[in-house]
Image (cartoon, rainbow, N blue to C red):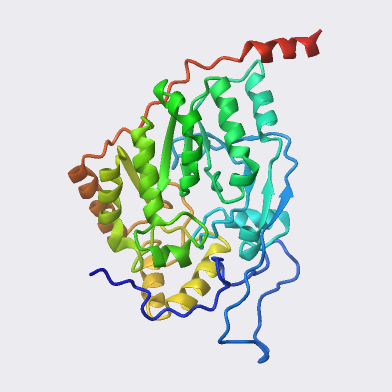
Amino acid sequence: MFRSIFADMEKPAAKGRGAVTNRSGRFESIAVEDFDDGWGRDNEERSSPRTIVFEDRARTIINSNDSPDVPFDRSVNPYRGCEHGCIYCFARPSHTYLGLSAGLDFETKIYAKHDAAALLRAQLSARRYQPRVIVVGANTDPYQPVEARLGLTRSVLQVLSEFSHPVAMITKSSLVLRDLDVLAPMAERRLAQVSVSVTTLDPELARVMEPRASAPSRRIEAIRRLSQAGIPVAALAAPMIPGLNDWEMDRILEAAREAGAVTAGYVLLRLPLEIADLFTEWLYAHFPARARRVLDLMRQSHDGKLYRSEFGTRMHGSGPYADMLEKRFDAAAARLGFSERGFKLDTSQFKVPRAQQAQLGLFET
């Protein structure tokens, strides 16, 4: 019988939220953090701060990326911040550029690009635009809960479909199944694929580590239904956290392969900037007996530091533990028959729709 690692967990964090605190960002002149003055209610569960959605008035929607560590150079993110609340999310520090905290602010103050579809249509219609695969969800999850109401990701997909433009989706939400009617026809033309992140198969661990993301079973089911619809799926065992969920790597890959995933990847936990402190306080709050071991293994994998940002090693780390994790992944991927080549999406079909060409012509005359 599988025993959850949560037998002795404390629960000091707000219900349904990942970060324990709302520490000030690195650009703020005044540091603010929670402090127990003796009048707190230590034995009572903290109330959950509500989610507020703001309008993000972006000028463009396609982001450029020149990192040699990732296989794409363009992405679209309809949202800034993510309500999933994953404590390990590498996008958290981006909220500090808004004068907000990478902690609870990141998961409760969401910025939505309501004109994402219009901005995308304009950029794709530019005369000098050259198509390359666009990744949707490279920073924050395009299918976070607010998407069910706003539908910004769906509108972006519809534009890409109109232009026959290839797209790769990254998500940990079963809400992606809502858009099967758009993704499946695109995939049939080699214009779409989906990567699904599965961090753990333990629902209790998922509930505290990524509190508002889809349950693990629903992500595996999403892989199954996407595959059945003819959409190529990659399973991402990411991130792997030493001493916490790393032992599950083989089980995650096996479940994903059985559900129909055709390729897979993994990433070692990354702790850049504010995430190091946020993750450390979360770890001591929920897993005090394991915290030192987890952090020691992270330091072993980054030359004595919790994180090193150099290209080439930041995704998988280095040293004995990191090498062992890589060998485990390679062995499991080979045993399960995962493809090493990934997917080849087709950029040759890209074409600006006639209606859009006619509209642009009106502005040029």
Quarter holding the N terminus is bottom left
> Residue at position x 28%, y 72% from top?
3
Position of 107 with respect to 187 (left or right) is right
Does residue 365 appear to the left or right of 22 in the view shown? right
Vertical placement of 117 versus 280: above or below?
A: above
The image position of residue 300, as x and y in percent, is 36, 66
The structure residue drawn at horizontal position 43% and vertical position 21%, both measured from the top left corner, is 346
Q: How many numbered dots are placed on residues in this image?
A: 0
Residue farthest to the right, as pictured: 365
Residue drawn at the location 31% of the way across and 32% of the way down:
341
**The furthest residue to the left:** 335
Viewer-nearest residue: 79 or 155: 155
Q: Check the image and report above or below for 35 versus 258.
A: below
Q: Quadrant of residue 95?
A: bottom right
Location of the C terminus (image quadrant): top right
Please tell me which residue is depicted at 69% across the width and 41% down the height of the picture.
113
Instruction: Say above or below: 14 vs 220.
Output: below
Q: Is residue 236 visible?
A: no
Direction from residue 296 to residue 84 in the image, left or right: right
**Quadrant of residue 359 in the image?**
top right
Residue 235 spot, x, y in % from top left: 35, 45
Q: What x and y, as percent, mark residue 61? A: 65, 35
Residue 302 falls in which quadrant of the image?
A: bottom left
Give the left or right position of residue 147, taking residue 344 as reference.
Answer: right
Q: Position of residue 172 (x, y in %)?
A: 46, 49
Q: Residue furthest top?
A: 365
Residue 110 visible in the snapshot = yes
